[in-house]
Image (tube, helix red, strand yellow):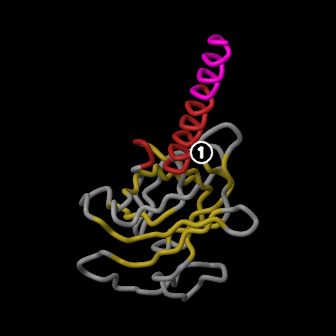
């Protein structure tokens, strides 16, 4: 009789521990996502340039929109005059600069989309990787699909985007 009581208590403890670990895993995975509002940092000045919100569309692809410029001196050209697609001559603020991109199976990497540099109008193949526990987002762009050369991406994009602590959204 005493053995049955011990087994029930032991089983309940294992279930509780399993649920707690599952919850912690879900929270950790939510932090390791590109979704949320990010503050981009200029490579040269190390100053914030813009706030970009990355969301997931109905098809499961990523969408990134410039919500706000953080530049002390506004850009001389507020519109994307060098863009060659549907974004030509549209304002840079409110512009969708990330289109597509899906999580790579078994990895914390999002690829397959495009990222636009509104300063030169070029679209780059996109790779996003959350780093530092999801506090930063490594952004890579390439003109060649698999040659991740790290070009300087303009208007708010450097290699690393820092999430403002009061803005970072957690998606589960």
Instruction: Tell me where residue 77 appears, x and y as whole percent.
Output: 40, 86
The C terminus: image quadrant: bottom right
Q: Nearer the viewer, residue 94 or 32?
A: 32
Q: Residue 7 magenta-drawn?
A: yes
Which residues make up the magenta segment? 1-13
Q: Tell me: residue 136, above or below residue 93.
A: above
Residue 158, image quadrant = bottom left
Instruction: Tell me where residue 84 appears, x and y as whole percent.
Output: 63, 78
The N terminus: image quadrant: top right
Badge count = 1
Residue displayed at 57% across by 52% down: 142
Is residue 43 shown left or right of residue 21?
left
Residue displayed at 54% across by 88% down: 90
Q: Tell me: residue 71, above or below residue 148.
A: below
Is residue 81 shown left or right of residue 103?
left
The residue indicated by pointer 1 is: 109
């Amino acid at each position: 009789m005493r053995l049955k009581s011990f087994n029930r208590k032991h089983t309940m403890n294992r279930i509780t521990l399993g649920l707690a670990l599952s919850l912690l895993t879900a929270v950790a995975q939510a932090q390791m996502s590109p979704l949320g509002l990010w503050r981009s940092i200029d490579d040269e000045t190390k100053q914030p340039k813009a706030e970009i919100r990355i969301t997931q569309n109905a098809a499961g692809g990523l969408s990134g929109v410039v919500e706000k410029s953080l530049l002390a001196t506004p850009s001389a050209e507020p519109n994307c005059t060098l863009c060659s697609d549907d974004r030509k001559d549209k304002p840079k603020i409110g512009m969708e600069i990330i289109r597509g991109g899906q999580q790579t199976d078994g990895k914390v990497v999002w690829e397959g989309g495009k990222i636009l540099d509104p300063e030169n109008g070029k679209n780059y193949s996109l790779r996003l990787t959350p780093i530092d526990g999801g506090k930063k987002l490594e952004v890579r762009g390439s003109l060649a699909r698999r040659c991740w050369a790290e070009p300087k991406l303009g208007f708010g994009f450097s290699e690393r985007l820092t999430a403002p602590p009061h803005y970072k959204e957690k998606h589960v």
